[in-house]
Image: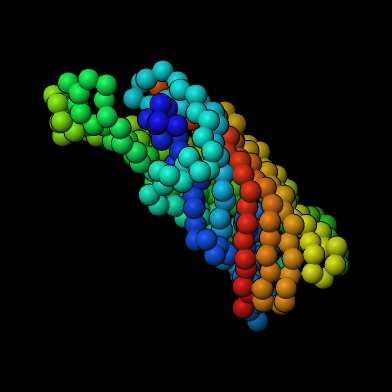
Amino acid sequence: MKSCLFPALAALGSLLAAGSAVAADIYSPLTPTAQETTTESGWTFSFAPYFWAAGLTGDVAAFGLPEADVDASFSDIFDHLDFGAMAIGEARYGPYSVFGDVMYTKISGQAGTPRGILATDVELSSETFAGLLGAGYSIFEDSSTRLDIVGGLRVWHAETELSFSGGVLDGVSRSDDATWVDGLAGFRGTYSFTPEIYLTGWGLVGAGGADLDWDVAAAIGYRFSDTISAVAGYRALGVDYSNDGFVFDVVQQGPILGLVVRF
């Protein structure tokens, strides 16, 4: 991992957030509601932070340097994680829904230079934000099944900063960043085998600033009571963006786990 520390860290702030270990339900905004309350007007609301233990593979580039191949497991990423958070929210009225999904990470690392002339140490930090805002409509619903068609916009912002210590470049820092928006569309659904056990999942695909942006997941849930349930599943997300020497062509995937308390 150390041999590819700098190119890897330039992309590791890419949705690989480590939220609270006691994260709430892994209900993304594209899944059924998590912590839900119903108002007299008929609206329902939900909010859920969640935990996604994802690794990362792909190609990245910044500062005009050649593309570098990245292959990092979640444990590799976690070693350099400074801060991460993921949270979703949804408002639903009958077959209509409005949802949001926000993800932020900050990752950093430091290494010595081979000769120590230009600098003795180089530190690299990476911050990534991804926010999805969308709407959905139920095209099929019965006592055990619901299928929604959904669409929305995802805003990405990725920033990488290099800081030099010692040598000729002591105190010098440089940053490179990119911001873009992608339009996404797809489906989400849920199916209950029993009042306690259910399946949920979603699939989205789109483009815009990126050549391709996609997100798929599947999970199984168990309701211990009306207020507490747990879910476990798998999520994969990919984005292919390049512009003016900044390349972010990566796939993140890994298990999702969570506990939800409804009230």
The quarter of the rendered structure image containing the N terminus is: top left
Residue toward you, 63 or 153:
63
From this viewpoint, is residue 50 visible? yes
Q: Residue at x 63, y 38 (%)?
A: 214
Spot occupied by residue 110 in the image (x, y as percentages of width and height): 31, 36
Count of marks overlaid on the render: 0
Q: Position of residue 109 (x, y in %)?
A: 34, 38
- Residue 117 falls in image quadrant: top left
Q: Quadrant of residue 194?
A: bottom right
Q: Residue at x 35, y 35 (%)?
A: 160
Q: Is residue 238 above or below residue 146?
A: above
The spot of residue 132 in percent (x, y) is 54, 49
Vertical position of residue 116 compared to residue 237: above or below: above
Please identify the quadrant where the C terminus is shown: bottom right
Name the residue at 40% across, 52% down: 83
Residue in front for this viewpoint, 132 or 76: 76
Q: Is residue 207 above or below residue 114?
A: below
**Left or right: where does residue 261 sit relative to residue 71?**
right
